[in-house]
Image (cartoon, rainbow, N blue to C red):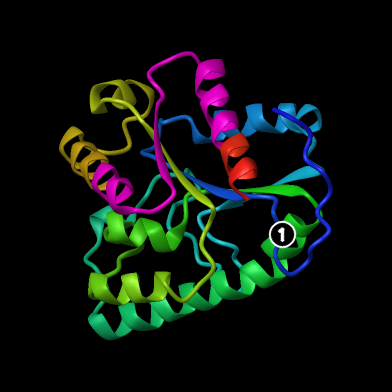
Amino acid sequence: MQPITKVKNWLFPSCPWIVLLGLDGSGKSSVIEALDDLLAAAGYEGLFVMHRRPQVVYRLAAASSAGRIEHYQKPPHSRGRSAVKLAAMWLDWLSGYVLHIHGRRARGILVVADRHSLIDLLVDPLRYRYGGSPRWVRLVVRLVPMPNAVILLDAPTAVLQTRKQELTTEKATELRHNYLNLVQQWPGSYVIDVDRPLDEVVADVQSILQELRIGR
């Protein structure tokens, strides 16, 4: 990758921000760690990582201290409570973009979201016990700044299950299908096969970042 020149336009920063999606075991954390090691050579001023959401307004976690998602064992919230929760998540992303993302992009810092709670709601609402309409989520998504690219780290379910088995095979297969359907319709989305060596996966992510640079 060629060095990135420092951003001069504060209102419309050209430094990208991206979201990594994928089932547990797809290697999101490993890719982020590898990108961190390559930042200086690529010309970025640093790396800022968010996990699921900015946590400015909405801080409740969807996992136990052991990291396992507990909400799959619980019923979804009522439509009213789901609407309140969705509004809190929307406000979290809106304020989070202003406070945590925009300024860093303007300073040439690469922003990477390890999952995105609003996008996840379209794929896996039960992770957040969301029981409202998907139309509400699609509306909210249009009302917040969204990333320059959504990258799905994908592999056959059997491969992912050998790495992590927090989900049943049936649930993992369903979620993988949902993710693939989402990215087919999402503008600026990519699918990367992670059933390969990590360096090849990271090289693909670097190519996407380079493409975003050229496009802007």
Q: Which amino acid type corresponds to the residue marked 1 in the rendered image?
A: Pro
Decide which of 160, 197 is in the foreground and name it: 197
Tell me if residue 138 comes above or below residue 88 in the rendering: above
Dot 1 falls on a residue whose secondary structure is loop
Residue 45, compared with residue 157, is above or below; it is below
Image quarter of residue 122 = bottom left
Q: Nearer the viewer, residue 14 or 120?
A: 14
Q: Say which of 141 and 120 sits in front.
A: 141
Residue nearest the observer in this picture, 65 or 166: 166
Number of marks present in the image shown: 1
* Residue 95 picture location, percent across and down: 62, 75
Tell me where residue 78 appears, x and y as whole percent: 24, 79
Q: Is residue 3 above or below residue 201?
A: below
Residue at mark 1: 13
- In this view, which residue lies farthest toward the bottom? 80
Q: Residue at x 25, y 61 (%)?
A: 74
What is the quadrant of residue 58 in the picture? bottom right
**Is residue 131 visible to the viewer in this orientation of the structure?**
no
Outermost residue on the front side: it is 215
Q: Residue furthest left?
A: 170
Taking the spot 42% from the left edge, 15% from the top edge, the residue there is 196
Residue range of the region highlighted in magenta in the rendering: 179-208
> Which of the image's four quarters has the N terminus?
top right
Within 10 Å of disc 1 (Cα), the crowding (few <14, some 14-19, many 20+) is some
- The percent coordinates of residue 136 (x first, y second) are 30, 77
Tell whether 128 sits left or right of 150. Answer: left
* Image location (x, y in percent) of residue 177: 21, 41
Report if residue 201 lies within the magenta region. yes
* Residue 161 in view (yes/no): yes
Which residue shows up at 73% across the image and 70% down it?
A: 11
Image-based side of 127 in relation to 169, left or right = right
Q: Horizontally, is 165 left or right of 49 in the view?
A: left
